[in-house]
Image: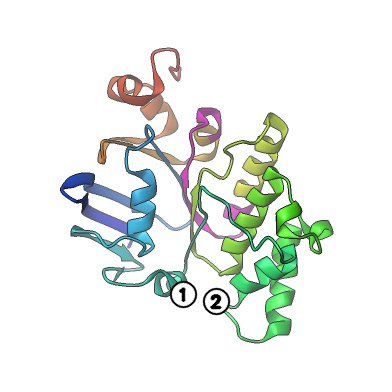
């Protein structure tokens, strides 16, 4: 059984179709990329999966259980974590505090939550900055903190929404290594990213969404050679040999 099953998912905003009959399966342990033009429905799909927006028809199953009607905190408790494009840490609180809050999704003991948070901060390379205030972090560190907060919830599936946007080449390379390390710990990932070199190097499979519809799915090589994907998103200058 796939870890995540999205079956014929459709959602409308006041009659405008944002996601249209979308289907996708994720197997445990995969890194799956989700790409498409701005406004194509990627973040809306994340919001459907995590209970932020209710969908009109279709189904989302996680470990065989329907997510229909579940609230975001309920989806999180089942084992789905996510990041957001607009990173908003608790600015007047420390990095450690920010991550401890996420740890309470799995444990109620403050000492255990803090121990878990410290382990995660070490994983993401932010342990030396545990006492920094959120508002004083660089863009790159805010992105890392966003990932750490999501990891603290103890996800089996992690949805990453453009966590590498705004990073310089060195920071991007470090972020790629971090995502691969997270995957090695047993977390399955669905990754939205516009930097094609990133998504191509990370993903086992890639799904392409355009005007809310899936127009292609396959290996990075297959997607990079798709005439429909090149026309809708990649452009002729980007062709995978």
Horizontal side of residue 72 vs 87, given as left or right: left
Number of marks present in the image shown: 2
Residue at left offset 70%, top offset 81%: 112
User: Label 2 belongs to which residue?
Assistant: 105
Which residue bears the numbered disc 1?
A: 77
The quarter of the image holding the C terminus is top left
Quick one: label 1 or label 2, which is nearer the N terminus? 1
Residue 58 x %, y %: 19, 58
The x, y position of residue 83, in whole percent, is 52, 55
| Label 1, label 2: how far apart the Cα atoms are | 6 Å
The quarter of the image holding the N terminus is: bottom left
Q: Residue extending furthest front? A: 92
Asked if 60 appears above or below 167 in the picture, the reply is: below
> Within 10 Å of the Cα at label 1, are there few (<14), some (14-19), or many (20+) other Cα atoms?
some
In the image, 177: left or right of 126?
left
Colouring scheme applied when the structure was drawn = rainbow
Snapshot quadrant of residue 165: top right
Q: Is residue 188 magenta?
A: yes
59 relative to 98 in the view: left or right: left
- Span of residues in magenta: 181-198
Instruction: Confirm or deny contact between disc 1 and disc 2 (CB under 8 A).
Output: yes
Which numbered disc covers residue 144? none
- Specify the farthest residue to the right: 128
Q: Position of residue 238 (x, y in %)?
A: 45, 17
Asked whether the viewer can see residue 109, the reply is yes
Residue 103 picture quarter: bottom right
Which element carries disc 1, helix, strand or loop? helix
Magenta span contains residue 5: no
Residue drawn at x 31%, y 60% as measured from the top left = 53
> Residue 231 appears in which quarter of the rendering?
top left
């Amino acid at each position: 059984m796939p870890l995540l099953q999205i079956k014929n998912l459709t959602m409308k905003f006041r009659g405008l179709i944002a996601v249209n009959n979308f289907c996708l399966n994720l197997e445990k342990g995969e890194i799956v990329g989700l790409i498409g033009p701005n406004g194509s429905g990627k973040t809306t799909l994340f919001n459907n999966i995590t209970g932020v927006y209710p969908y009109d028809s279709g189904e989302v199953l996680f470990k065989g259980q329907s997510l229909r009607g579940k609230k975001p905190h309920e989806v999180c408790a089942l084992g789905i974590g996510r990041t957001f494009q607009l990173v908003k840490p608790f600015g007047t609180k420390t990095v450690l505090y920010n991550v401890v809050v996420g740890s309470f999704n799995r444990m109620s003991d403050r000492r255990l939550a803090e121990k878990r948070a410290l382990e995660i901060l070490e994983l993401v390379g932010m342990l030396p900055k545990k006492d920094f205030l959120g508002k004083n972090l660089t863009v790159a560190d805010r992105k890392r903190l966003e990932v750490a907060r999501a990891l603290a919830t103890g996800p089996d599936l992690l949805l990453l929404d453009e966590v590498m946007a705004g990073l310089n080449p060195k920071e991007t390379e470090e972020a790629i290594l971090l995502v691969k390390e997270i995957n090695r710990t047993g977390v399955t990932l669905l990754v939205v990213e516009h930097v094609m070199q990133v998504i191509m190097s990370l993903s086992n499979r890639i799904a392409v969404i355009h005007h809310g519809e899936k127009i292609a799915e396959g290996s990075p090589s297959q997607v990079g050679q798709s005439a429909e994907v090149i026309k809708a998103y990649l452009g002729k200058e980007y062709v995978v040999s």
